[in-house]
């Protein structure tokens, strides 16, 4: 069997044609393609506005600015995620309030979010335990008003418990920004990821369900935020024709026309990609559910549509994951320990004083997870090969 890639985008002749057409025009940036892509994307998610940006990370950064986050503000989020979902508010010198995850869904645990909000809003003795260790003895101005945002991550394409999180946010006057970068098309209780927050962000890196190379999209129903996003991504210009008039501190976070053209074709094919990914996940589930050392992904019933981003199993505690990965690699099968907890990344340990043991559920999950090769065009024979090999490795 040929080596199997970890992930692989599906690019057809239509994508090649769309990009080369752009190259024959004089608009390589700020042209008609991005407008079209944004309109189609907003319609797909079911929101008023979409704003194309240069990456998911750039999109998250602009949402944090729109929410008015500044130095020492507090953002509640998950430590079990890709690092961008926490880095985005560090850019504005805000502080993470990590809340441990639910061991089944791998999303932030709403009960603990409620506890964190309660403690911080009432500024009681427990409040400072939610802060990063190195900040606990710092003199804070006013913890209750410093807490502004909840930033849930829809891990691996399964939406977080948005009903409970929305209720908490509403009760305490907090803003929700969804990191929906892994969850395009996913639905929680019939409502799409991206419809719940004040804004939400999607990412189009090549391993995502659809790709533009690099790129991302912010969606929102908030008119003020919409105009702010358009200005901020374009160097703080207020209107497009005031070319050298920079009203605010902005960035170059624009999405170019080649990427937008690629994204439009990919978006048109999204439903077929999601269906194929669903099929691949089902093939994996069927073959792996009987292996006792393997736990297959758990999807809560409230998630009426999963958008499979990666296929991640959990290995029993006594299994040596590195050895499994090495043995799979020898057979041409890549696999990844997906994710390393954010609070244990070197920068976060050095800067905020986090240590192993701070978020026990996240850490025990992180020790046992293994992502297997996963993409829309993975064949049943390839899934068979991965599963048979894994079974032999685990049960020699
Ligand atoms: C992919 C991803 C992002 C965005 O990544 P970019 O590479 O900046 O597009 C953000 N958050 C999560 C959870 C992601 O998986």
Image: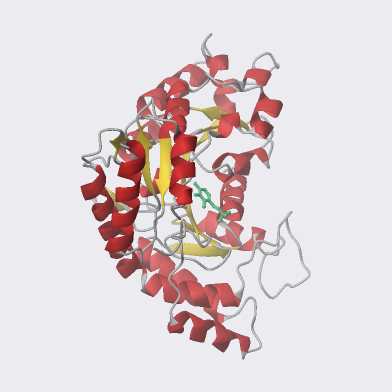
252 relative to 392, above or below:
below
Q: Nearer the viewer, residue 301 or 92?
A: 301
Q: Is residue 179 left or right of residue 375?
A: right
> Is residue 24 visible from the viewing direction of this image?
yes
Residue at the bottom extreme of this rendering: 24
Say which residue appears at 33% left-offset and 60% top-offset.
382
Residue at the image point whose x is 49% and y is 43% from the top: 326
- Residue 303: tell me if it is visible: no
110 versus 277 height, above or below: above
Q: Residue 48 location, x and y as percent? A: 42, 62
Residue 349 rendering spot, x and y as whole percentages: 65, 27
Which residue occupies 36% across, 73% down? Answer: 269
Judge left or right: residue 151 versus residue 378: right
* Location of residue 289 with respect to 381 vertically, above or below: above
Residue 245 placed where, x, y %?
A: 77, 67
Farthest-out residue, right:
244
Q: Nearer the viewer, residue 231 or 219?
A: 219
Seen from the viewer's position, the closer of residues 390 and 15 is 390
Query: Could you tell me residue 141's position as x and y percent?
Result: 67, 21
**Which residue is outermost to the top?**
125
Going by the image, does 362 lie left or right of 290? right
Q: Name the image quarter holding the C terminus.
A: top left
Rendered-image quadrant of the N terminus: bottom left
Who's the residue at 64% across and 16% down the image? 136
In this rendered view, identify the residue nearer to me: 59 or 226.
Answer: 59
Total marks drawn? 0
* Colour scheme in use: secondary structure
């Amino acid at each position: 069997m040929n080596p199997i890639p970890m992930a692989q985008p599906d690019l057809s002749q239509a994508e090649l044609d769309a990009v080369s057409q752009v190259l024959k025009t004089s608009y390589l940036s700020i042209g008609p393609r991005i407008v079209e892509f944004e309109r189609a994307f907003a319609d797909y998610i079911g929101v008023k506005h979409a704003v194309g940006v240069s990456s998911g990370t750039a999109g998250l950064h602009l949402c944090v600015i729109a929410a008015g986050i500044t130095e020492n503000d507090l953002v509640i989020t998950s430590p079990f995620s890709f690092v961008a979902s926490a880095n985005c508010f560090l850019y504005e010198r805000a502080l993470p309030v990590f809340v441990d995850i639910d061991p089944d869904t791998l999303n932030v645990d709403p009960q603990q979010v409620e506890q964190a909000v309660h403690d911080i809003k009432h500024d009681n003795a427990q409040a400072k335990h939610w802060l990063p260790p190195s900040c606990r003895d710092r003199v804070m101005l006013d913890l209750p008003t410093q807490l502004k945002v909840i930033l849930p991550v829809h891990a691996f394409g399964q939406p977080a418990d948005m009903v409970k999180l929305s209720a908490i946010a509403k009760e305490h006057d907090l803003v929700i920004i969804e990191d929906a970068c892994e969850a395009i098309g996913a639905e929680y209780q019939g409502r799409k990821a991206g419809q719940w927050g004040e804004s939400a962000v999607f990412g189009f890196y090549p391993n995502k369900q659809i790709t533009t190379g690099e790129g991302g999209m912010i969606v929102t129903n908030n008119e003020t935020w919409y105009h702010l996003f358009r200005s901020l991504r374009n160097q703080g210009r207020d209107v497009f024709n005031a070319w050298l008039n920079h009203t605010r501190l902005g960035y170059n976070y624009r999405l170019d026309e080649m990427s937008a053209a690629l994204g439009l074709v990919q978006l048109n094919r999204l439903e077929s990609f999601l269906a194929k990914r669903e099929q691949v996940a089902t093939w994996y589930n069927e073959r792996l559910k009987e292996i006792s050392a393997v736990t297959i992904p758990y999807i809560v019933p409230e998630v009426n549509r999963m958008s499979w981003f990666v296929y991640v199993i959990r290995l029993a505690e006594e299994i040596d994951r590195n050895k499994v990965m090495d043995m799979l690699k020898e057979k041409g099968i890549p696999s990844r320990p997906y994710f390393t907890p954010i609070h244990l990344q070197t920068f976060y340990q050095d800067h905020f004083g986090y240590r192993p043991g701070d978020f026990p559920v996240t850490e025990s999950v992180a020790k046992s997870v293994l992502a297997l090769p996963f993409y829309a065009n993975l064949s049943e024979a390839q899934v068979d090969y991965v599963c048979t090999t894994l079974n032999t490795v685990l049960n020699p």
